[in-house]
Image (cartoon, grey):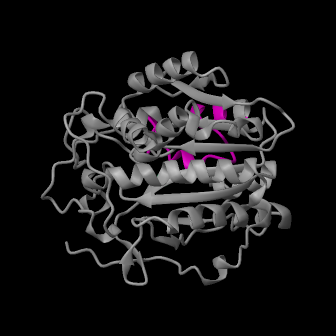
Amino acid sequence: MKKTMMTMAIAGALTLGATQVAPMQTEAVGNGPGYGGNETINTSILTSHSEMAAFLRKQEAKQKDMQLEVIGQSMKGRDLFLVKYMKNPDNPTILFLTQQHGNEALTTEGALDFIKSLGTGKMKGVTDNVNILIVPRLNPDGAAGDVNFSLDDYVASGDHHLTRYNANGVDLNRDHVTRIQPETKALHDNVLSAYDIDYMIDLHHQGPNSEVDGELVSGSILYPTTPNVSDDVLAGSKQLGAVVYDAISKKGWGHIGKYPGGSAETISRNGIAVEYGISTILFEMRGMADHEYPSYVLGQKSNGYLIKQTVTTLESTTRAIADGSIHSKDTSFWDDLPTQTSRQSEE
Ligand SMILES: [Zn+2]
Protein backbone atom coordinates (compact mmCIF):
# COMPACT_ATOMS: atom_id res chain seq x y z
CA MET A 1 0.00 0.00 0.00
CA LYS A 2 2.68 2.45 1.00
CA LYS A 3 4.78 1.50 -1.96
CA THR A 4 1.85 1.98 -4.30
CA MET A 5 1.16 5.41 -2.87
CA MET A 6 4.77 6.47 -3.28
CA THR A 7 4.84 5.22 -6.84
CA MET A 8 1.66 7.12 -7.56
CA ALA A 9 3.04 10.22 -5.88
CA ILE A 10 6.12 10.15 -8.07
CA ALA A 11 4.07 9.43 -11.16
CA GLY A 12 1.62 12.15 -10.20
CA ALA A 13 4.20 14.89 -10.24
CA LEU A 14 5.42 13.85 -13.65
CA THR A 15 2.40 12.63 -15.51
CA LEU A 16 0.45 15.83 -15.72
CA GLY A 17 0.16 15.48 -19.47
CA ALA A 18 2.76 12.77 -19.83
CA THR A 19 2.25 9.46 -21.56
CA GLN A 20 5.14 7.64 -19.96
CA VAL A 21 7.12 7.77 -16.76
CA ALA A 22 10.50 6.19 -16.34
CA PRO A 23 10.45 3.19 -13.99
CA MET A 24 12.31 3.39 -10.70
CA GLN A 25 15.95 2.67 -11.38
CA THR A 26 17.44 0.00 -9.19
CA GLU A 27 20.62 -0.68 -11.11
CA ALA A 28 23.86 1.24 -10.70
CA VAL A 29 23.75 4.90 -11.47
CA GLY A 30 26.16 4.62 -14.38
CA ASN A 31 23.53 2.71 -16.36
CA GLY A 32 21.28 5.74 -16.54
CA PRO A 33 21.67 6.96 -20.10
CA GLY A 34 23.21 10.31 -20.89
CA TYR A 35 21.91 12.37 -23.75
CA GLY A 36 24.62 11.70 -26.30
CA GLY A 37 22.36 12.97 -29.06
CA ASN A 38 20.50 9.65 -29.21
CA GLU A 39 17.62 10.16 -26.86
CA THR A 40 14.60 12.41 -26.84
CA ILE A 41 14.43 14.76 -23.87
CA ASN A 42 10.79 15.76 -23.63
CA THR A 43 10.41 18.79 -21.39
CA SER A 44 6.60 18.52 -21.61
CA ILE A 45 6.61 15.84 -18.88
CA LEU A 46 7.93 18.32 -16.31
CA THR A 47 5.42 20.06 -14.05
CA SER A 48 4.66 23.51 -15.45
CA HIS A 49 4.38 26.49 -13.12
CA SER A 50 0.60 26.67 -13.48
CA GLU A 51 0.35 22.93 -12.80
CA MET A 52 2.55 23.38 -9.74
CA ALA A 53 0.38 26.25 -8.47
CA ALA A 54 -2.76 24.14 -8.89
CA PHE A 55 -1.11 21.17 -7.15
CA LEU A 56 0.00 23.31 -4.19
CA ARG A 57 -3.45 24.87 -3.78
CA LYS A 58 -5.02 21.42 -3.83
CA GLN A 59 -2.58 20.15 -1.21
CA GLU A 60 -3.23 23.18 0.98
CA ALA A 61 -6.96 22.44 0.84
CA LYS A 62 -6.32 18.79 1.80
CA GLN A 63 -3.62 19.24 4.47
CA LYS A 64 -4.65 21.12 7.59
CA ASP A 65 -1.04 21.65 8.74
CA MET A 66 0.12 23.14 5.45
CA GLN A 67 0.00 26.80 4.51
CA LEU A 68 0.77 28.17 1.08
CA GLU A 69 2.12 31.69 0.71
CA VAL A 70 3.16 33.79 -2.25
CA ILE A 71 6.43 35.47 -1.27
CA GLY A 72 6.82 37.59 -4.40
CA GLN A 73 6.92 37.46 -8.16
CA SER A 74 9.57 36.58 -10.68
CA MET A 75 10.87 39.09 -13.21
CA LYS A 76 8.11 37.99 -15.62
CA GLY A 77 5.42 38.10 -12.93
CA ARG A 78 5.14 34.43 -11.96
CA ASP A 79 4.26 33.78 -8.32
CA LEU A 80 7.04 32.55 -6.05
CA PHE A 81 5.69 30.06 -3.51
CA LEU A 82 6.50 29.18 0.08
CA VAL A 83 5.02 26.01 1.53
CA LYS A 84 4.94 26.11 5.34
CA TYR A 85 4.46 23.52 8.05
CA MET A 86 4.92 25.52 11.23
CA LYS A 87 3.02 24.13 14.21
CA ASN A 88 5.29 25.46 16.94
CA PRO A 89 7.72 28.35 16.48
CA ASP A 90 9.96 26.82 19.18
CA ASN A 91 10.62 23.72 17.07
CA PRO A 92 13.73 23.56 14.89
CA THR A 93 13.12 24.72 11.33
CA ILE A 94 14.49 23.48 8.02
CA LEU A 95 14.24 25.19 4.63
CA PHE A 96 14.36 23.28 1.35
CA LEU A 97 15.12 25.40 -1.71
CA THR A 98 14.84 24.10 -5.29
CA GLN A 99 15.47 25.26 -8.82
CA GLN A 100 17.35 28.50 -8.35
CA HIS A 101 18.66 27.33 -11.70
CA GLY A 102 15.69 26.84 -14.01
CA ASN A 103 17.13 23.91 -15.95
CA GLU A 104 17.70 21.85 -12.76
CA ALA A 105 14.18 20.57 -12.60
CA LEU A 106 13.83 17.20 -10.89
CA THR A 107 14.54 18.57 -7.43
CA THR A 108 11.25 20.47 -7.70
CA GLU A 109 9.42 17.33 -8.86
CA GLY A 110 10.81 15.59 -5.77
CA ALA A 111 9.83 18.47 -3.49
CA LEU A 112 6.25 18.25 -4.74
CA ASP A 113 6.20 14.52 -3.99
CA PHE A 114 7.55 15.27 -0.51
CA ILE A 115 4.79 17.84 0.09
CA LYS A 116 2.25 15.24 -0.95
CA SER A 117 3.80 12.66 1.38
CA LEU A 118 3.53 15.07 4.32
CA GLY A 119 -0.22 14.75 3.97
CA THR A 120 -0.14 10.97 4.24
CA GLY A 121 0.20 8.49 7.09
CA LYS A 122 3.78 7.83 6.02
CA MET A 123 4.95 11.11 7.59
CA LYS A 124 2.29 11.30 10.31
CA GLY A 125 3.34 13.23 13.39
CA VAL A 126 6.66 14.49 11.99
CA THR A 127 5.51 18.10 11.79
CA ASP A 128 4.74 18.07 15.54
CA ASN A 129 8.48 18.32 16.15
CA VAL A 130 10.00 20.14 13.17
CA ASN A 131 8.97 23.15 11.15
CA ILE A 132 9.37 22.75 7.40
CA LEU A 133 9.67 25.53 4.84
CA ILE A 134 9.81 24.67 1.16
CA VAL A 135 10.50 27.12 -1.65
CA PRO A 136 9.94 25.05 -4.77
CA ARG A 137 11.36 26.55 -7.98
CA LEU A 138 12.81 29.97 -7.12
CA ASN A 139 13.40 30.57 -10.85
CA PRO A 140 10.10 29.90 -12.66
CA ASP A 141 10.99 32.09 -15.66
CA GLY A 142 14.15 30.11 -16.37
CA ALA A 143 12.19 26.88 -15.85
CA ALA A 144 9.63 28.00 -18.42
CA GLY A 145 12.24 29.30 -20.83
CA ASP A 146 10.49 32.69 -20.67
CA VAL A 147 13.64 34.83 -20.73
CA ASN A 148 15.02 37.90 -22.49
CA PHE A 149 17.66 36.00 -24.44
CA SER A 150 17.66 33.26 -27.04
CA LEU A 151 17.50 29.56 -26.12
CA ASP A 152 17.49 28.44 -29.77
CA ASP A 153 20.70 26.44 -29.33
CA TYR A 154 19.41 24.49 -26.29
CA VAL A 155 19.14 20.74 -26.91
CA ALA A 156 15.93 19.48 -25.26
CA SER A 157 12.74 18.72 -27.14
CA GLY A 158 9.21 19.31 -25.91
CA ASP A 159 7.05 22.36 -25.41
CA HIS A 160 9.70 24.62 -23.85
CA HIS A 161 13.37 25.05 -23.08
CA LEU A 162 14.78 25.47 -19.58
CA THR A 163 17.73 27.64 -18.62
CA ARG A 164 19.95 28.19 -15.59
CA TYR A 165 19.43 31.96 -15.59
CA ASN A 166 16.48 34.15 -14.69
CA ALA A 167 14.71 36.30 -17.29
CA ASN A 168 17.45 38.93 -17.04
CA GLY A 169 20.15 36.35 -17.74
CA VAL A 170 21.38 36.47 -14.13
CA ASP A 171 22.56 33.46 -12.14
CA LEU A 172 20.41 33.72 -8.99
CA ASN A 173 22.90 31.66 -7.01
CA ARG A 174 25.45 34.46 -7.39
CA ASP A 175 23.00 37.12 -6.15
CA HIS A 176 22.78 36.28 -2.45
CA VAL A 177 24.72 39.31 -1.24
CA THR A 178 23.35 42.17 -3.36
CA ARG A 179 19.88 40.62 -4.02
CA ILE A 180 19.26 42.72 -7.10
CA GLN A 181 16.93 40.19 -8.73
CA PRO A 182 13.28 39.97 -7.56
CA GLU A 183 13.56 36.22 -6.95
CA THR A 184 16.52 36.43 -4.54
CA LYS A 185 15.10 39.56 -2.89
CA ALA A 186 11.82 37.75 -2.18
CA LEU A 187 13.67 34.77 -0.70
CA HIS A 188 15.75 36.95 1.62
CA ASP A 189 13.03 39.44 2.63
CA ASN A 190 10.13 37.05 3.06
CA VAL A 191 11.72 33.75 4.06
CA LEU A 192 15.30 34.03 5.34
CA SER A 193 14.73 37.25 7.31
CA ALA A 194 11.20 36.34 8.33
CA TYR A 195 11.77 32.99 10.10
CA ASP A 196 14.21 31.58 12.61
CA ILE A 197 15.72 28.90 10.37
CA ASP A 198 18.23 26.34 11.62
CA TYR A 199 18.98 24.27 8.53
CA MET A 200 18.79 24.67 4.76
CA ILE A 201 19.33 22.32 1.85
CA ASP A 202 19.85 24.02 -1.50
CA LEU A 203 19.02 21.52 -4.24
CA HIS A 204 20.63 21.63 -7.69
CA HIS A 205 21.66 19.48 -10.64
CA GLN A 206 25.20 19.19 -12.01
CA GLY A 207 26.52 17.67 -15.24
CA PRO A 208 25.99 13.91 -15.64
CA ASN A 209 29.63 12.87 -15.94
CA SER A 210 31.06 13.34 -12.44
CA GLU A 211 32.51 10.31 -10.72
CA VAL A 212 34.17 9.04 -7.59
CA ASP A 213 35.90 5.67 -7.24
CA GLY A 214 35.48 5.12 -10.99
CA GLU A 215 31.69 5.20 -10.83
CA LEU A 216 29.36 8.00 -11.90
CA VAL A 217 27.77 9.72 -8.92
CA SER A 218 24.05 10.13 -8.30
CA GLY A 219 24.91 13.45 -6.70
CA SER A 220 27.41 15.45 -4.70
CA ILE A 221 27.18 17.39 -1.44
CA LEU A 222 29.09 20.16 0.31
CA TYR A 223 28.89 22.25 3.49
CA PRO A 224 29.75 25.98 3.69
CA THR A 225 33.37 26.54 2.68
CA THR A 226 33.78 30.23 3.45
CA PRO A 227 36.29 30.95 6.24
CA ASN A 228 33.66 33.26 7.82
CA VAL A 229 31.25 30.49 8.80
CA SER A 230 31.02 29.89 12.55
CA ASP A 231 32.12 26.58 14.07
CA ASP A 232 28.59 25.79 15.29
CA VAL A 233 26.99 26.44 11.91
CA LEU A 234 29.65 24.38 10.16
CA ALA A 235 29.22 21.50 12.60
CA GLY A 236 25.44 21.54 12.02
CA SER A 237 26.00 21.62 8.27
CA LYS A 238 28.27 18.59 8.42
CA GLN A 239 25.68 16.72 10.50
CA LEU A 240 22.95 17.62 8.01
CA GLY A 241 25.19 16.26 5.25
CA ALA A 242 25.78 13.09 7.27
CA VAL A 243 22.03 12.44 7.43
CA VAL A 244 21.78 12.85 3.66
CA TYR A 245 24.85 10.74 2.96
CA ASP A 246 23.67 7.86 5.13
CA ALA A 247 20.16 7.89 3.67
CA ILE A 248 21.28 8.00 0.04
CA SER A 249 24.17 5.55 0.38
CA LYS A 250 21.76 2.84 1.52
CA LYS A 251 19.96 2.98 -1.81
CA GLY A 252 21.04 0.82 -4.75
CA TRP A 253 21.14 3.87 -6.99
CA GLY A 254 22.90 6.10 -4.46
CA HIS A 255 26.53 7.10 -4.95
CA ILE A 256 27.66 10.40 -3.45
CA GLY A 257 30.77 12.49 -3.98
CA LYS A 258 32.02 15.70 -2.42
CA TYR A 259 31.32 18.77 -4.53
CA PRO A 260 34.41 20.87 -5.36
CA GLY A 261 32.96 24.25 -4.32
CA GLY A 262 34.56 27.64 -3.65
CA SER A 263 34.26 30.21 -0.87
CA ALA A 264 32.18 32.99 -2.53
CA GLU A 265 29.42 34.29 -0.27
CA THR A 266 27.30 35.30 -3.27
CA ILE A 267 26.45 31.58 -3.33
CA SER A 268 23.62 30.54 -1.01
CA ARG A 269 25.49 27.66 0.69
CA ASN A 270 28.12 30.14 1.92
CA GLY A 271 26.33 33.48 2.15
CA ILE A 272 23.21 32.27 3.96
CA ALA A 273 25.30 30.30 6.47
CA VAL A 274 27.26 33.43 7.38
CA GLU A 275 24.49 36.05 7.24
CA TYR A 276 21.76 34.13 9.06
CA GLY A 277 23.70 31.49 10.99
CA ILE A 278 21.87 28.71 9.15
CA SER A 279 23.55 25.33 8.74
CA THR A 280 23.49 24.66 5.01
CA ILE A 281 24.37 22.03 2.49
CA LEU A 282 24.40 22.07 -1.27
CA PHE A 283 23.08 18.93 -2.97
CA GLU A 284 23.90 18.61 -6.66
CA MET A 285 21.99 15.82 -8.42
CA ARG A 286 23.13 14.19 -11.60
CA GLY A 287 22.32 15.77 -14.98
CA MET A 288 20.33 18.75 -16.22
CA ALA A 289 16.97 18.89 -18.01
CA ASP A 290 18.21 21.22 -20.76
CA HIS A 291 21.35 23.11 -21.73
CA GLU A 292 23.16 24.44 -24.75
CA TYR A 293 25.91 21.86 -24.14
CA PRO A 294 24.57 18.36 -24.91
CA SER A 295 27.06 16.81 -22.47
CA TYR A 296 25.38 18.56 -19.51
CA VAL A 297 21.97 17.05 -20.22
CA LEU A 298 20.83 13.71 -18.85
CA GLY A 299 18.27 11.43 -20.48
CA GLN A 300 14.89 11.30 -18.85
CA LYS A 301 15.16 7.56 -18.13
CA SER A 302 17.08 8.59 -15.01
CA ASN A 303 14.23 10.78 -13.74
CA GLY A 304 12.79 8.09 -11.45
CA TYR A 305 15.79 7.62 -9.18
CA LEU A 306 16.72 11.30 -9.20
CA ILE A 307 13.26 12.31 -8.00
CA LYS A 308 13.46 9.55 -5.39
CA GLN A 309 16.86 10.91 -4.33
CA THR A 310 15.24 14.28 -3.58
CA VAL A 311 12.36 12.69 -1.67
CA THR A 312 14.79 10.54 0.35
CA THR A 313 16.88 13.62 1.18
CA LEU A 314 13.93 15.69 2.33
CA GLU A 315 12.28 12.90 4.31
CA SER A 316 15.46 11.71 6.05
CA THR A 317 16.57 15.18 7.16
CA THR A 318 13.09 16.13 8.31
CA ARG A 319 12.89 12.98 10.44
CA ALA A 320 16.41 13.39 11.86
CA ILE A 321 15.68 16.95 12.97
CA ALA A 322 12.26 16.00 14.34
CA ASP A 323 13.61 13.16 16.49
CA GLY A 324 16.86 14.92 17.39
CA SER A 325 19.04 12.16 15.96
CA ILE A 326 20.83 14.71 13.77
CA HIS A 327 22.69 15.91 16.88
CA SER A 328 24.44 12.57 17.34
CA LYS A 329 25.47 12.13 13.69
CA ASP A 330 29.13 11.24 13.21
CA THR A 331 30.62 13.66 10.69
CA SER A 332 33.97 11.94 10.22
CA PHE A 333 32.82 10.52 6.86
CA TRP A 334 33.48 13.96 5.39
CA ASP A 335 37.22 13.43 5.89
CA ASP A 336 37.13 10.35 3.67
CA LEU A 337 34.51 11.43 1.13
CA PRO A 338 36.29 11.73 -2.23
CA THR A 339 35.91 14.95 -4.18
CA GLN A 340 34.26 14.12 -7.48
CA THR A 341 36.15 14.42 -10.74
CA SER A 342 34.78 14.77 -14.24
CA ARG A 343 34.79 11.68 -16.45
CA GLN A 344 36.09 12.49 -19.90
CA SER A 345 33.12 13.07 -22.17
CA GLU A 346 32.93 10.82 -25.24
CA GLU A 347 32.15 13.79 -27.46
ZN1 LIG B 1 22.37 24.81 -9.89
176 falls in the magenta region? yes
Relative to 243, 30 lies left or right: left
Q: Which of 126 and 136 is in front in this view?
A: 126
Count every numbered label the image shows and give the total: 0
Q: Nearer the viewer, residue 82 or 264?
A: 82
Where's the C terminus, which quadrant?
bottom left
Residue occupying image coordinates x 21% and y 59%: 35
Residue occupying image coordinates x 65% and y 78%: 333
Q: Nearer the viewer, residue 155 or 110?
A: 110
Residue 298 seen in this snapshot:
yes
Name the residue furthest front. Answer: 1
Q: In this view, does 110 lie above or below 261?
A: above
Q: Where is residue 254 in the image (x, y as percent from the top left)?
A: 44, 66
Magenta stretch, residue numbers: 165-188
Q: Position of residue 70 (x, y in %)?
A: 60, 21
Residue occupying image coordinates x 78% and y 48%: 198
Q: Where is residue 215 in the image (x, y as percent from the top left)?
A: 37, 78
Q: Is residue 326 above or below residue 133?
A: below
66 falls in the magenta region? no
Q: In this view, does 273 lie above or below 169?
A: below
